[in-house]
Amino acid sequence: MTVFRAFSNQEILTYLTAQVPDGRVLTDDSTLRQYSFSDKQTGDDSGLALAYIEAHSTKDIQGALKAARKYHLPVIPQDQMTSTVIGADGLTDSLILSTAKMNHVLDISKADSVAVVEPGVINGDLDKLAREQGMFYAPDPGSKPISGIGGNVATNAGGMSTVKYGATKDNVLGVKVVLADGREIKLGGRTLKQAFGYDLTQLMIGSEGTLGIITEVTVKLLPIPLGTPVMGVAFFDNMTELAKAVTAIRISGVYPTMLEALDGNTVAALDRYEKTHYAKDSAAMLIFKLDNGGADSMKVVEDILTEQQASNVTITTKPEEQADLEQLRRDMLPAVFAGQNHIMEDMAVPLSQLAPLMDYIQDLAQRLNVDIYTAGHAGDGNVHPTLVWPKEATKTPEAVIIALQEMFKKTLELGGTISGEHAVGMLKNQWNNAELGEDVDMLQHQIKALFDPMNLLNPKRKIN
Ligand SMILES: Cc1cc2nc3c(=O)[nH]c(=O)nc-3n(C[C@H](O)[C@H](O)[C@H](O)COP(=O)(O)OP(=O)(O)OC[C@H]3O[C@@H](n4cnc5c(N)ncnc54)[C@H](O)[C@@H]3O)c2cc1C
């Protein structure tokens, strides 16, 4: 049936362009394709946007939203587009509203221990600037060199040092947000404590672009710790044994900055990718770091590793070797993804359940004959099993889908969450009811309706 449209695309684009005074409205096919489709294994969930708005100012964002309200167009907030859950891909005839070019560091204050930044500032760039002043920005997702603070806040990104310094939500003090109706509001601020009103700053963190567009973020900076950082690797017969060691170190009082796990499959993939030789004789590798590896703390770690029968333990205080180890961990994704179809998952369980979850994943892979590479921020009980299958396959194999469903169910049974840090996006929103329960699911929709009654902001993502 023919649907008669009230407005032509030309009319919409002319109006939209007039509302964006500082930025650019791009509509050429190659730009729209580039920013509408990230490379995810998802079939047809994404769609080609009508326009890509490169916002340079709050006024641009307010103007784009005005056009979206007038013509009832979905708006997709986008930063650096590294989402692993189809959070920022286009939808058919949507407006992609990019804050990537709003990328100025507005203030770094050592005295207040804060930085104020626009959303498009790259995480690693902010950290580098802070370090020049003896401070650092703690949240360090694997995508640190390529993801933006706006995207990090909108997904509540975690990372390797979350085990000690918390996730993004623990390091954000305030945000400015443009609401769907065009008002810009300021939440939180520069104080390290704040107990006034409902905590809407925290509501915005992890809201995945569904409640408002983040235009400014005030983050905590921390002083670089004194002492000599120590890093090390240790190997275990399997991930279950490794998980036991992780739990013991986590509760020992040494406050590690990193407790990262890589299973045998992942280590072998890294060896191929990096030309290293870690996989020789072990099935699971732990990378650990202590910001200040004093003799007392190191003795505690070494004793635990001996007790847990770790082998080939190597420790280094050399900065260049530490950088190589961190890079090895960061290269986990490209190493595993190389030339294969993949879905990377992101469950987190209470620490006591980490070993049972590792056991379960290993059994599942064998039972369903699915290739699973498991790595993750083990110190947070957060694992990223990556399921891979041959590039030539035109459809996701049934066994992969069943394996995902079973892993999710098991995670919930163990008291965990199916999204530890990568957010929900379009990949996991069907699981809302299972994870949240009916009452909370409904409350979340009521909150969404309060902020965005026309359901313009990132529809079909997170809760829908
Ligand atoms: C190699 C690699 C490693 C990764 N490692 C980690 C990791 O260790 N930990 C982790 O947590 N994640 C990780 N990720 C996932 C991803 O990098 C994070 O989710 C990141 O926070 C997304 O930031 P971005 O700037 O790319 O945002 P985008 O992908 O552009 O957007 C992400 C979400 O934020 C919303 N959004 C973007 N900008 C705004 C804004 N201004 N206002 C409101 N909403 C907005 C989008 O609508 C979308 O829902 C990794 C990804 C890759 C590719």
Image (cartoon, rainbow, N blue to C red):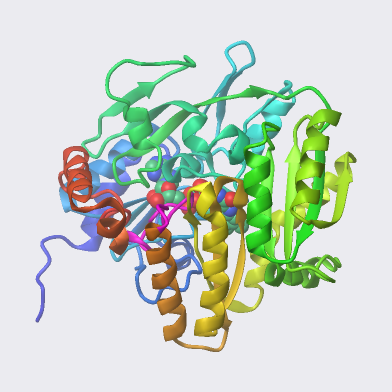
- The answer, for residue 24, to whether it is visible in the render is no
Q: Residue at x 82, y 45 (%)?
A: 322
Left or right of residue 319, residue 359 in this image = left
Q: Residue at x 78, y 22 (%)?
A: 226
Find the residue positioned furthest to the top.
111
Q: Is residue 419 magenta?
A: yes
Q: Nearer the viewer, residue 146 or 376?
A: 376
The N terminus, quarter of image: bottom left
Residue 376: which quarter of the image?
bottom right
Segment tinted magenta in the rendering? 414-429
Left or right of residue 11, residue 169 in this image = right
The C terminus, quarter of image: bottom left
The correct choice, above or below, for 250 with respect to 326 in the image is above
Residue 26 x/y as whole percent: 41, 55
Residue 387 x/y as whole percent: 54, 73
Q: Is residue 164 magenta?
A: no
Predominant secondary structure, magenta span: loop
Q: Residue at x 87, y 46 (%)?
A: 315
Residue 269 x/y as whole percent: 73, 71
Residue 380 x/y as whole percent: 56, 46
